[in-house]
Amino acid sequence: MTATPPSSSTDSDLQLVERTVAGDQRAYELLVIKYQRRIERLIGRMVRDVDLVQDIAQETFIRAYRALHQFRGDAQFYTWLYRIAVNTAKKALMDMKRNPVVSENALRGGDEEDETSRVDHELTTQETPETVLAAQEIAHVVNAAMEALPEDLRQAVTLREIEGLSYEEIASAMNCPIGTVRSRIFRAREAISAKVRPLLENQSGKRW
């Protein structure tokens, strides 16, 4: 009498992976359901064309399924899945010769489920044309600054500031030492701040 309901929240990612590799298709469906929205948000920060997001996400999960036997649980499943999603999105962008873009809103707020993201939605009662314009200008500058970053810096700061991964998880995702991760994030933050700081100083006496 040890039957476990398929949707049991006690199933760890590793257990679901093991069940999938053993032939339990429903276990993989649970992994897709668990991470689909997060993967789509991640891809949406890299790809301008919203119509491509679901296609790239679907391709990500297909590729992950095919490679699932390689997952050993050394890193978190999402870290492993993130790597596949980024590579899949990069391939799509290269095929279409488009550049990844991270929105200023994503950089400041990130996950819709994160309480900090409420800041981005609490401007309604205090918005003025000036504050809206200022926010749009800053968003444009942040986008440009992110696009101008070398790929390794952009990926590191995205993982830290948007995805909220730890330095250890980022090191695993990027296959580099933690010290390198810290250096890349520091350099990325400095580059972005250098572009945004003049605008913030101009708006120092205003709410935006």
Image (cartoon, grey):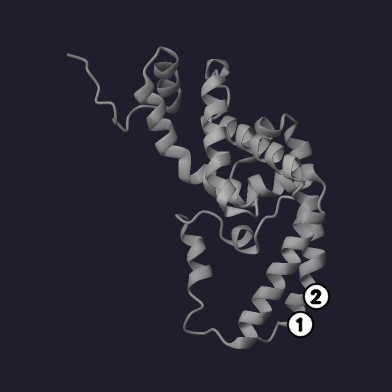
Residue position for label 2 = 198
Residue position for label 1 = 202
Q: Residue 180 sits in which quadrant?
A: top right
**Which residue appears at 59% of the width and 51% of the height?**
44
Q: Is residue 69 visible?
A: yes
Q: Can residue 207 be seen in this view?
A: no
Label 2: state its secondary structure: helix
Circle 1/circle 2 CB separation < 8 Å:
yes
Q: Is residue 55 above or below residue 41?
A: above
Residue 60 location, x and y as percent?
57, 33
**Which residue appears at 64% of the width and 45% of the height?**
159
Label 1: state its secondary structure: helix
Residue 1 location, x and y as percent?
17, 13
Residue 119 location, x and y as percent?
51, 69
Residue type marked 2: Pro
Q: Is residue 58 above or below residue 200?
A: above
Is residue 152 found left or right of 122 in the rendered image? right
Q: Residue 5 sits in which quadrant?
A: top left
Judged from this view, the residue extending furthest toward the left is: 1
**Which residue appears at 60% of the width and 58% of the height?**
106
Residue 111 location, x and y as percent?
51, 54
Q: Which mark is residue 118?
A: none
Residue 138 versus residue 36: which sits nearer the camera? 36
In 3D space, how far apart are the residues under numbered discs 1 and 2 (Cα atoms)? 6 Å
**Which residue appears at 57% of the width and 26% of the height?**
63
Residue type marked 1: Asn
